[in-house]
Amino acid sequence: MNVSLNGKKILIVGASGILGDCLLRRLLEEGAIVGGTYYSQSVKTLTEDLVPYDHQLILQHVDASDPISIQKGLTRLVKQLGTIDSYIYNSGICEDALLPFMSFKKWKHVMSVNLDGAFLAGRIVSKEMIRLKKGKILHIASYKGVFGSYGQANYSASKAGMIALTKTMAKELGQFGISVNALCPGFMITNLNRNPEKKRERAIQDSVLSSISEPLEVVDFIIYLLSDKIFNLSGQVLHLDSRM
């Protein structure tokens, strides 16, 4: 089956990190024109081997915990892209602690990036998509937003909120031809993991296939979702996982 994103304009909030970087590169390889935000990496580090894709790539530094940074950065990217076919919110952080010992600062910081950022970015992008009467929105949520996670009340609650935001946006934006879905990848080794090997072993134990996800598998699934092969899919929480 031929799946093509050639010429499609795609905005990624959170284009650095293991999953974001993998997604950015694959979209460029598929011929998409990509506007991406980054925070912790430098532009030089992010683009040092992406010179062949200069004509397809626009990058903007954005702090997803700062409403002003989101407003300015995404407004600039939307203007530079001209139109948006698809938008992905992939920004996320963890600051773990057991609930009785979790500071409000840790709670609020995770919420501000994972949930407030998704709201603020979605508000900007959805206005542009409403104008165009089309578009696909994908939130990178989490298994933990459905089932909870020991020591991660803030992270789990933020992803549960993202899932509710996804369903509400789907209901509100469907009339304009805009689909909104949430994707919960399986466990992956990323820069958010603490004690990754211990968590990997637990994920494998909980998996009926005794496996974990690989970033490229998740990215290939996303590419299919963003392609013209799928139309009648919105308001869904998609588990790319085998944990039960």
Image: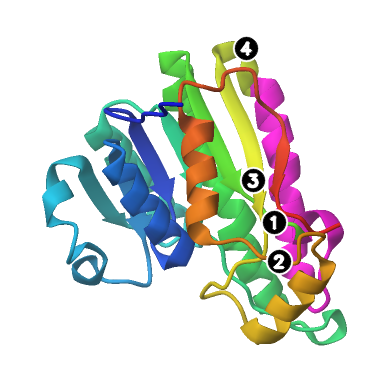
Q: Secondary structure at mark 2?
A: helix
Specify start and end residues of the magenta stretch as a single range.
144-172
Q: Is 168 part of what is drawn in magenta?
A: yes
The disc label shown at residue 175, or none: 4
Q: Is residue 15 visible?
A: no
Do callouts 1 and 3 mark residues in contact (Cβ within 8 Å)? no
| Dot 4: element | helix
Whether the residues at callouts 4 and 2 have beta carbons within 8 Å, the answer is no
Query: Are circles 3 and 4 on residues that touch, CB within 8 Å?
Result: no
Amino acid, disc 4: Gln
Q: Which comes sooner in the sequence, label 4 or label 2?
A: 2
Residue contact at pointers 1 and 2, CB within 8 angstroms: yes
Q: Is residue 100 above or below residue 166?
A: below
Q: Main secondary structure of the magenta part?
A: helix
Res 80 seen here = yes
**Residue where numbered disc 1 is placed:** 142
Q: CA distance from mark 2 to mark 3?
A: 15 Å
Give amino acid for label 2: Tyr
Q: CA distance from mark 4 to mark 1?
A: 27 Å
Please provide percent x and percent y for residue 188.
Answer: 60, 67
List the residue tagged with mark 2: 155
Amino acid carrying mark 1 in the image: Ser
Residue beneath the point at 61% across and 70% down: 109
- Scheme by which the image is coloured: rainbow
The answer to whether 65 appears left or right of 200 in the picture is: left
